[in-house]
Image (cartoon, rainbow, N blue to C red):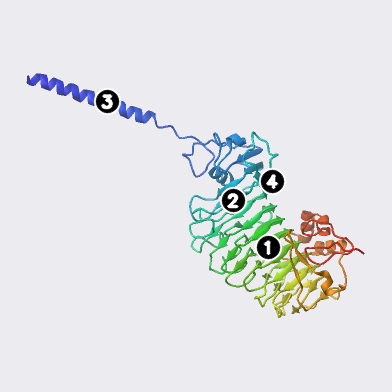
């Protein structure tokens, strides 16, 4: 009896061991081997991204195998982030993005860092696009949003991330809205401190060009003066070029409610842009702050930007053409406050310079060691520290006007009667080409600006309406005056 029990117990134990071994073998066979991908920081990602494509397709949640080769195989937001930050060569690639929201991180902190050329990123495509068809595009209907709203509460605040940090590369982006970018004091460093778009690289190999884009509702909570401000665009070094870009309702603690240039080798081009509703709670540059650097501006409007320290403020070099710059009613520093010093070159022609505060200057050259030159045809109210050209028109009283449906400040020309003189397109182009700050990292900067915009850009207004080339109205709006 005992032997029988012993034999049975042995058989039971053997059966248990066999079953256990089989169970372990099944578990082992269910574990897939790791797959090689182009995602530098995510080796367990199961998507194999196609290399070297001329076109990549992206939808908010991705499609199919998500290799990016077509709309049916579109990358998702995570794949898009890794395409930009990874090793895939995009110098000859266009990335097409459908309508949707693409958050730039899974957690709070800094967003996507780019260190390579990207031929083009284009937003505004229908989510019903098929194959590789890119004909269904309308950037106003099919809004593509690059977002920092990690916590999903539809505002830029703690828990969110910044958007793009460009360290190197020639990059083009068209038809995209940037929204809810956020950076905190803790996350910011001396070389990574923007909440929206941040650029830090050599001006020769680092350039971001934005066309038909919107940058809105971004916030910099950075309090350290060297790192604060520029919640929409912060350029430490390198280039940012903006054509028909709207910068709306961005906010900072100080030093630039929307844009900040913060280094001698920072370059910003603006053509046909609108800066409205931006603000800071500290000081200097309600719309734009130039600690250093160089800005070239044509057909651009600054209005309703709140804070103190002028709508446009700074010690860099400024080329201001055909633009409307309005200082808010509560700011004693007015429209433009300039401290261009040695190595700089500030020129302005055919601008409308308004200070809504009745005692504030339209242009303040703030210090005897600084210099700036009016090249004529500006309409202004009051100036400090500078002698205006005899071709400028002073009008010390309030000017009336408002933004029209195109986002352009339309002022009442008949209010001031006969203007002293009107600019010609040729005169404006000559002034633009003569802009050449010694400290600029780009030789003959004004000529490069003219080449970028094309000479025709100086003969239209911000709406795209052709001006009378021989009688051009000051500011970004032109009523097309007859001879």
4 or 3: tag closer to the N-terminus: 3
In 3D space, how far apart are the residues under numbered discs 1 and 3 (Cα atoms)? 72 Å
Query: In terms of secondary structure, where does tag 2 sit?
Result: strand
* Residue occupied by mark 1: 275
Nearest to viewer (mark 4 / mark 3): 4
In terms of image quadrants, where is residue 96?
Answer: top right
In 3D space, how far apart are the residues under numbered discs 4 and 3 (Cα atoms)? 62 Å
Residue 147 screen position, x and y as percent: 57, 52
* Residue occupied by mark 3: 19
Depth order, front residue of 133/258: 133
Residue 326 screen position, x and y as percent: 71, 70
Classify the position of the C terminus by image quarter.
bottom right
2 or 1: tag closer to the N-terminus: 2
In 3D space, how far apart are the residues under numbered discs 2 and 1 (Cα atoms)? 19 Å
* Residue occupied by mark 4: 138
In terms of image quadrants, where is residue 99?
Answer: top right
Contact flag, marks 1 and 3 (Cβ < 8 Å):
no
Q: Residues within 10 Å of mark 2 (few under 14, many from 20)?
A: many
Contact flag, marks 2 and 4 (Cβ < 8 Å):
no
Residue 132 is tagged as none
Q: Residues within 10 Å of mark 4 (few under 14, many from 20)?
A: some
**Residue at screen point 11% across, 22% down:** 5
Image: 197 above or below 228: above
4 or 1: tag closer to the N-terminus: 4
Nearest to viewer (mark 1 / mark 3): 1
Q: Is residue 288 left or right of residue 319?
A: left
Q: Is residue 350 left or right of residue 193?
A: right
Depth order, front residue of 375/363: 363
Residue 146 is tagged as 2
């Amino acid at each position: 009896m005992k032997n029988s029990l012993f034999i049975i117990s042995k058989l039971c134990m053997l059966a248990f061991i066999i079953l256990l071994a089989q169970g372990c073998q099944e578990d082992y066979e269910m574990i897939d081997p790791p797959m090689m991908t182009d995602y530098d920081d995510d080796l367990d990602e199961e998507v194999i991204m196609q290399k070297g494509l001329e076109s990549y397709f992206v939808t908010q949640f991705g499609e199919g195998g998500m290799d990016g080769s077509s709309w049916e195989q579109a990358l998702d937001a995570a794949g898009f982030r890794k395409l930009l930050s990874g090793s895939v060569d995009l110098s000859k690639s266009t990335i097409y993005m459908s309508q949707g929201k693409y958050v730039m991180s899974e957690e709070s902190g800094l967003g996507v860092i780019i260190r390579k050329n990207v031929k083009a990123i284009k937003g505004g495509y229908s989510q019903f696009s098929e194959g590789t068809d890119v004909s269904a595009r309308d950037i106003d209907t099919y809004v593509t949003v690059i977002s920092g709203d990690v916590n999903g509460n539809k505002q830029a605040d703690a828990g969110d991330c910044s958007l793009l940090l460009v360290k190197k590369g020639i990059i083009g982006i068209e038809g995209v809205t940037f929204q809810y970018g956020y950076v905190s004091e803790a996350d910011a460093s001396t070389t990574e401190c923007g909440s929206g778009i941040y650029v830090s690289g050599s001006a020769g190999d680092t350039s971001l060009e934005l066309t038909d884009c919107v940058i809105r509702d971004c916030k910099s909570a950075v309090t350290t003066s060297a790192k604060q401000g520029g919640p929409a665009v912060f350029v430490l070094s390198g280039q940012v070029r903006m054509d028909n870009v709207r910068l709306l309702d961005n906010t900072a603690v100080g030093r630039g409610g929307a844009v900040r240039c913060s280094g001698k080798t920072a370059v910003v081009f603006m053509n046909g842009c609108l800066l409205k509703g931006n603000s800071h709670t500290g000081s200097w540059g309600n719309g734009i702050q130039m600690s250093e650097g160089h800005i070239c501006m044509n057909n651009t409007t600054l209005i309703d930007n709140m804070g103190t320290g002028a709508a446009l403020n700074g010690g860099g070099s400024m080329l201001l053409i055909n633009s409307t710059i309005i200082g808010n009613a509560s700011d004693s520093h007015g429209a433009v406050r300039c401290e261009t010093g040695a190595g700089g070159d500030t020129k302005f022609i055919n601008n409308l310079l308004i200070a809504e505060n009745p005692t504030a200057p339209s242009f303040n050259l703030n210090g005897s060691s600084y210099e700036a030159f009016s090249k004529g045809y500006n309409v202004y109210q009051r100036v400090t520290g500078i002698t205006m050209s005899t071709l400028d028109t002073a009008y010390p009283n309030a000017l009336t006007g408002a933004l029209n449906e195109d986002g352009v400040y339309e002022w009442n020309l008949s209010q001031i009667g006969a203007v002293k003189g009107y600019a010609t397109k040729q005169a404006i182009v000559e002034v633009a080409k003569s802009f050449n700050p010694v400290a600029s990292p780009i030789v003959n900067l004004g000529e490069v600006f003219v080449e970028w915009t094309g000479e025709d850009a100086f003969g239209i207004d911000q709406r795209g309406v052709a001006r009378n080339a021989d009688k051009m109205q000051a500011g970004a709006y032109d009523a097309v005056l007859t001879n």
